[in-house]
Image (tube, helix red, strand yellow):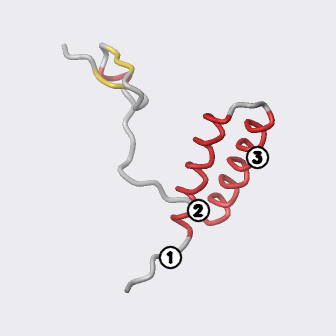
Amino acid sequence: MKPVAIFGHGDEVDDPHLAAHFAPTVSLLKREAFEICEVVADAERALLRSERPEEAARMAWLFDLVESRLIPAHDG
């Protein structure tokens, strides 16, 4: 039996029943997305205060990703 990826991090398990199955898209309410942005921004600031700039940069990237999905795309 071929190992199956689990949790999307390259971890592998031998039992396909333990593998995580994710939907191709995720829908969030606007309020949920704003709460995610707030928590991620708080985490970024805490990481910067803790002198962990690499992790803070990842939080900033995540914030930008979620925020970009909240702003409607403009054509032209």
Image height check: is 43 above or below 25? above
In terms of depth relative to the viewer, which is nearer, 34 or 28?
Answer: 34
**Element carrying mark 3:** helix
> Distance from label 3 to label 2 (Cα)?
15 Å
On the image, the x and y values in percent for residue 30 come to: 62, 66
Work out which residue is located at the far left of the displayed protein and give it.
1
Q: Measuring from the top left, give residue 36's x and y in whole percent.
A: 66, 52
The numbered mark, 2 or 1, whose residue comes first in the sequence reads: 2
* Amino acid found under the numbered disc labelled 1: Pro
Q: Secondary structure at mark 2?
A: helix
Is residue 62 shown left or right of residue 75? right
What residue do we see at 45% from left, 81% from top? 74
The Cα–Cα distance between marks 1 and 3, rounded to whole angstroms, is 24 Å
According to the picture, the residue beneath numbered tag 2 turns out to be 67
Query: What residue is at 40 percent from the left and 32 percent from the top?
Result: 8
Mark 1 surroundings within 10 Å by alpha-carbon count, few (fewer than 14), some (14 through 19), many (20 or more): few
Q: Earlier in the sequence, mark 1 or mark 3?
A: 3
Q: Circle 1 sits on which residue?
A: 72
Q: How many residues crowd around disc 3 within 10 Å: few (fewer than 14), some, or many (20 or more)?
A: some
Q: Measuring 37% from the left and 36% from the top, which residue is drawn there?
A: 21
Give the structural element (helix, strand or loop) at label 1.
Answer: loop
Q: Position of residue 67 (x, y in %)?
A: 58, 62
Foreground pick, 15 / 32: 32
In the picture, measured across the screen, residue 15 lies left or right of residue 25, that is left
Indicate the position of residue 62 as horizontal and vertical percent values.
56, 49
Q: Residue under circle 3?
A: 42
Residue 17 is marked as none
What residue type is disc 2 on?
Glu
The part of the image, by quadrant, that contains residue 16 is top left
In 3D space, how far apart are the residues under numbered discs 2 and 1 (Cα atoms)? 10 Å
For the N terminus, give its image quadrant: top left
